[in-house]
Amino acid sequence: MTRNRFKRPQSGTTLVETAVAATLIAVFFATIFELNAVCLHYIDASKESVAALQGVQDRVEALRNLAFTDLTNATFVQNLMATPANGSDFAKTKPQEVVIIYPYDTVHKTYDNTNKIKITRLPGAIVTPSINLNLLPSGTNVVEVKVTYTWSMLGGRSGSEQTETIISSGTKK
């Protein structure tokens, strides 16, 4: 009696099956790497937003700690802005920082946009602030201070953080 060897099913993979499996694995890993890159991009954007928020807060606190006569002196504020608000790499290299000091009308709860001190600090490690100055009226004893950071994020989007506060010429305790 002769046995037929080919009656058992043969197992194994063909070249086509192997190519399909390799393609699926390659697509899977490419998707994982792309997802990782997107996550890193979002993490970087959130770090920049937090650094900008911290820089704005640091600048406002530095201005709040000044004597009122120094705060309303454009030259003094310009010299203060020659350095970044804090020592972070972000504050040194990325944002454009704008500080505007307006006289504040406590009766009408508005600020005077025509008489203001505006100082802009451009991005970069060594910068010289540019100043656009209309003198504050004499007798100003309340000012509104507005600090704005703007910067370019990855992908061409722009980021912005801003805060403002009202400071009076009262005495510190």
Image (spheres, grey):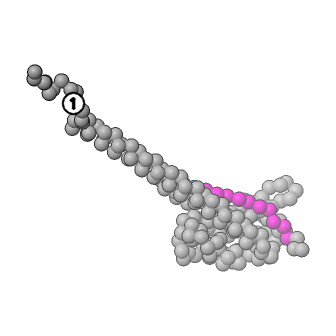
Residue lying at 55% horizontally and 60% vertically, measured from the top left: 151
Identify residue type, mark 1: Gln
Instruction: Specify whether residue 165 is painted magenta.
Output: yes
Q: Is residue 75 left or right of residue 43?
A: right
Q: Is residue 140 above or below residue 39?
A: below
Residue 106: name its quadrant. Answer: bottom right
Q: Is residue 1 above or below residue 62?
A: above
Q: Which residue is mark 1?
A: 10
Q: Nearer the viewer, residue 17 or 82?
A: 17
Residue situated furthest front in the rendering: 1
Q: Is residue 117 left or right of residue 84?
A: right
- How far from the left and from the top, in percent, is residue 57? 70, 64
Q: Is residue 32 above or below residue 99?
A: above
Residue lying at 69% horizontally and 68% vertically, measured from the top left: 59
- How far from the left and from the top, in percent, is residue 37? 45, 52
Q: Is residue 152 above or below residue 129?
A: above
Residue lying at 88% horizontally and 56% vertically, measured from the top left: 107
Q: Nearer the viewer, residue 30 or 143?
A: 30
Instruction: Specify whether residue 83 is painted magenta.
Output: no
- How far from the left and from the top, in percent, is residue 117? 70, 68
**Principal SS element in the magenta part?**
strand
Quadrant (top left/top right/bottom left/bottom right) for the N terminus: top left
Residue 91: name its quadrant. Answer: bottom right
- How far from the left and from the top, in percent, is residue 25? 35, 43
Residue lying at 58% horizontally and 64% vertically, measured from the top left: 96
- From which residue to which does the magenta span run? 156-169
Q: Nearer the viewer, residue 11 or 151?
A: 11
